[in-house]
Image: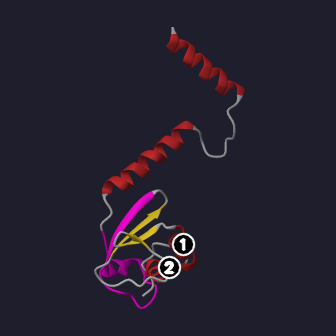
Amino acid sequence: MRVDKYLWSVRYFKTRSIATKACKKGAVKVNQDVVKPSRDVYPGDQIHVRKNQINYSLEVLNLPKNRLGAKLVDIYRKDTTPKEAFESQEILQYAKKYYRKKGTGRPTKKDRRDLEDFTNNQEE
């Protein structure tokens, strides 16, 4: 089975064309080699996928005939992604939410004055 079709069928990508683009960009590795979308995968292969700033690792256990339901995915792959990858993503999300809310735009004059007051108080 092609690697792009496999990643789509085990629900790592929403569409097969997105999986193909990820392979073309070099975000998919099979057994530590960057692969083209047409590369065949076999049971026992190690696949590494970089998606949303997380490096997913999985082992191919079996090849499905077509796209699977979410409950059946674990029959065909073993997820070996370290937990640290997900924890670092959570920290990034908290940092983004703390600084500014999404869609608020540039800092206002009040924000600038507050920042200046804060930095002036620390210098004293």
Left/right of residue 66 with respect to residue 120 in the rendered view: left
Magenta residues, start to end: 54-79
Bin the neighbour count of mark 1 within 10 Å (Cα to Cα): few under 14, some 14-19, many 20 and up: some
Is residue 37 or residue 69 the one in the foreground?
A: 37
The location of residue 38, given as percent across then percent down, is 49, 83
Instruction: Identify the element where label 2 is drawn.
Output: loop
What residue is shown at x 32% (from left), y 85% (from top)?
A: 62
Q: Earlier in the sequence, mark 1 or mark 2?
A: 1
- Which amino acid, by three-letter code, is at mark 2? Pro
Using the image, determine if residue 112 lies above or below residue 31.
above
Provide the residue designation for mark 1.
24
Using the image, determine if residue 124 lies above or below residue 32.
above
Evaluate if marks 1 and 2 touch, with contact meaning CB atoms under 8 Å apart: yes
The location of residue 57, given as percent across then percent down, is 35, 67
Residue 61 magenta-highlighted:
yes
| Quadrant assignment, res 74 | bottom left
- Which amino acid, by three-letter code, is at mark 1? Lys
Provide the residue designation for mark 2.
37
| Quadrant assignment, res 34 | bottom left
What residue is shown at x 61% (from left), y 19% (from top)?
A: 116
The location of residue 109, given as percent across then percent down, is 71, 26
> What residue occupies the far front of the structure in this picture?
33
Using the image, determine if residue 53 lies above or below residue 32.
above
